Image: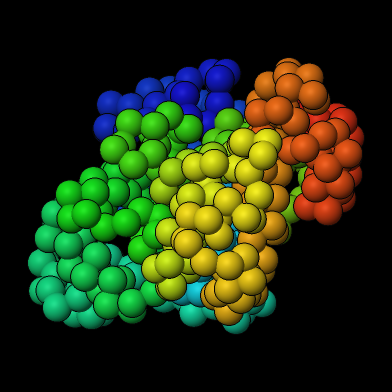
């Protein structure tokens, strides 16, 4: 199940018959999630005498019972930092405005705004469940829709035109699973450069979702099992007699961030610099690949290439090459048992010392310490 592996009884949608079974069963404690349309369940939750913990705020229940909520703000912060590190100067959040009520105190947009303010980046929010977003895109929102993505086939193309109208790369974070996959296909069909013109990260249910699109989609995946575990632990405390405030909230930040093709490139509004960055991305693994190779590609001096990079990115060519090598090396350290010398060869480093210097500069520790730290973090969970 989404939130937990063991429970006396798990039900995802409630009918009158299900509620009758609950009343007969008389549970000692309940972990529940309700949506706006779950009023029958809400009536039961409010009437039952069992200890309870919620996984989502809705219909006023957030003021009546402790909640274990995902730390959406932390997810937003990580995505925004990722885009900022890739030189995006404009970000867009696509998600429900109802996050404010469903997950009070921690929303994706709040987290993104913190990072945007820190880096001086423009941030725009598009809330498809609000009429203002439809008007902004020149559309009329239907009064009654069963889901906020029911008309995404119409919403998506207008959103693409809106984002391309900025004439600079835009980093888009979408918290809807279904329209995220639909949108990445729309971008491909319209020959939009991903991530050169529009970079994209989506929040998904699992890490496999982003591996089936034409352009592989970067995903941030909440650990719902951890949320269920923490909700159960919170319920244990309540059942043991601990007095918690009726509006007590705990936020679970554990997640996985999988970077794929849709957001894995440093971007620039300068087409020539973008071309050079793409060349670096495709060749950094070659051990003899240097800034001079980039200058040769452009048929100009290394000095002129360096000036152009500094003007566009405020970074040198060697720094961009090191960025891609170090990021790939970190991923190999996390996901494989390759020996360090093998990683040196696969990432294009000239030798172990260059690899160690790069890791210390980026992560503050040498490769072996980085791998141990990753293993310790995995063991915690």
Query: Residue 230's x, y, as percent?
Result: 67, 37
Q: Nearer the viewer, residue 178 or 226?
A: 178
Q: Nearer the viewer, residue 4 or 239?
A: 4
Q: Is residue 21 above or below residue 143?
A: above
Q: Is residue 336 visible?
A: yes
Residue in the picture at 33% in, 78% down: 166
Quadrant position of residue 359: top right
Query: Residue 244's x, y, as percent?
Result: 73, 53
Q: Quadrant of the C terminus?
A: top right
The colour scheme used to paint the residues is rainbow
Query: Residue 231's x, y, as percent?
Result: 63, 38
The mark total stands at 0
Q: Is residue 379 above or below residue 347?
A: above
Is residue 234 left or right of 131 when viewed as pictured? right
Q: Is residue 74 visible?
A: no
Is residue 254 left or right of 195 when viewed as pictured? right
Q: Nearer the viewer, residue 94 or 315?
A: 315
Q: Nearer the viewer, residue 35 or 258?
A: 258
Quadrant position of residue 198: bottom left
Residue in the picture at 48% in, 55% down: 297
Residue in the picture at 66% in, 28% down: 346
Query: Residue 37's x, y, as percent?
Result: 29, 50
Residue in the picture at 43% in, 72% down: 269
Is residue 136 left or right of 77 when viewed as pictured? left
């Amino acid at each position: 199940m989404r939130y937990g592996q063991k429970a006396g009884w798990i039900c995802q949608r409630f009918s009158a018959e299900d509620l009758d079974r609950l009343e007969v069963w008389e549970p000692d404690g309940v972990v529940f999630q309700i949506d706006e349309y779950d009023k029958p369940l809400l009536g039961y939750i409010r009437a039952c005498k069992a200890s309870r913990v919620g996984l989502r705020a809705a219909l006023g229940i957030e003021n009546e019972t402790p909640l274990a909520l995902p730390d959406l703000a932390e997810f937003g912060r990580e995505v925004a930092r990722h885009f900022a590190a890739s030189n995006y100067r404009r970000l867009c959040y696509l998600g429900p405005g109802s996050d404010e009520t469903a997950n009070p105190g921690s929303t994706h947009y709040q987290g993104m705004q913190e990072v945007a303010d820190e880096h001086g980046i423009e941030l725009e929010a598009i809330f498809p469940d609000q009429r203002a977003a439809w008007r902004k895109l020149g559309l009329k929102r239907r009064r009654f829709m069963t889901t906020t993505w029911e008309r995404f086939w119409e919403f998506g193309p207008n959103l693409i035109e809106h984002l391309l109208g900025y004439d600079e790369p835009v980093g888009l974070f979408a918290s809807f699973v279904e329209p995220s996959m639909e949108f990445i296909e729309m971008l491909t069909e319209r020959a939009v450069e991903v991530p050169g013109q529009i970079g994209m990260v989506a929040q998904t249910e699992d890490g496999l979702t982003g591996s089936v699109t034409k352009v592989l989609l970067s995903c941030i995946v909440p650990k719902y099992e951890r949320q269920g575990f923490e909700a159960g632990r919170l319920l244990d405390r309540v059942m043991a007699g601990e007095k918690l405030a009726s509006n007590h909230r705990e936020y679970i930040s554990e997640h996985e961030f999988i970077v794929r093709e849709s957001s894995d490139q440093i971007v620039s509004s300068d087409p020539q610099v973008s071309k050079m960055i793409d060349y670096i991305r495709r060749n950094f693994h070659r051990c003899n690949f240097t800034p001079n190779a980039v200058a040769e590609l452009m048929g100009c001096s290394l000095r002129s290439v360096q000036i152009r990079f500094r003007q566009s990115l405020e970074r040198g060519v060697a720094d961009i090459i090191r960025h891609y090598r170090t990021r790939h090396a970190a991923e190999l350290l996390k996901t494989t048992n390759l020996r360090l010398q093998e990683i040196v060869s696969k990432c294009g480093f000239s030798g172990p010392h260059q690899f160690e210097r790069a890791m210390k500069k980026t992560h503050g520790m040498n490769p072996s310490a980085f791998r141990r730290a990753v293993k310790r973090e995995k063991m915690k969970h």
